[in-house]
Amino acid sequence: MNTPLAADGPGSELEVRLSVNGRQVRRRIEARMHLADFLRHELQLTATHVGCEHGVCGACTVRVDGEIVRGCLVLAAQVEGCEVTTLEGLDATGAIADLQQAFVRHNALQCGFCTPGMLLCAAELLERAPTTDRAQIRDHLSGNYCRCTGYHAIVSAVAEVARDRLDAAGGVSNTTV
């Protein structure tokens, strides 16, 4: 991520150029606009939720150049020239279809507010540690709050996908659902 450009104060604007979900974007925005607000209000990518606005709840989770970040803690100006991926972008690739289906099967979502952040974090974990176990899943998702389901169903959904992906690849899984 880039260092934000100096701004003259409230109401200062600047132009940002970045790629969002594979599409080049160029907008003139308030210098102090957060990435989550930019995605929601400028690009209408509403899977990125704003919850605590302190980076604690995980509702605003997105990827910047492949790394998970909290969109409420990053200024849109800081991602100048970066590749931003939201849940909409990940969903469009089909890469998380099995994860989404497992969330439904396990009733791992209710109100849906935390679900985009949970899915992005779970997808990251499954990419980086395909032989993950339930303790690792809980640890990796611990920065995302869910007030509806309790975490057991979410962990079970991720564990099932980890096991199924390893089975499909002919690997040995240490994950139990």
Image (cartoon, rainbow, N blue to C red):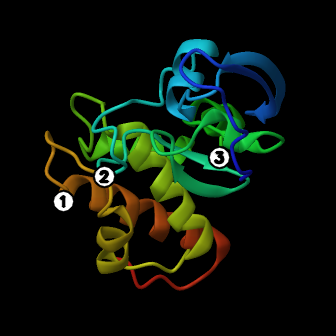
The amino acid pointed to by label 2 is Val
Relative height, residue 166 to residue 98 (above, below): below
- The image position of residue 160, as x and y in percent, is 39, 62
Disc 3 to disc 1: CB gap under 8 Å:
no
Q: Residue at x 56, y 74 (%)?
A: 130
Give the image location of residue 78, x and y in percent. Answer: 68, 43
27 over 110 or under it: above or below: above
Q: Is residue 80 left or right of residue 145?
A: right
Q: Nearer the viewer, residue 153 or 9?
A: 9
Query: Is residue 46 left or right of 139 when viewed as pictured?
Result: right
Query: Neighbour class for label 3 at 10 Å: few (<14), some, many (≥20)?
Result: few
Q: Quadrant of the C terminus?
A: bottom left
For label 2, the residue is 56
Q: What residue would you read off at disc 3?
A: 95
Q: CA distance from mark 3 to mark 1?
A: 23 Å
Image point (34%, 55%), residue name: 157
Foreground residue among 47 and 14 = 14
Marks 2 and 3 sit apart, C-alpha to C-alpha, by 26 Å
How many numbered circles does the render carry? 3
Disc 1 designates what residue? Answer: 152
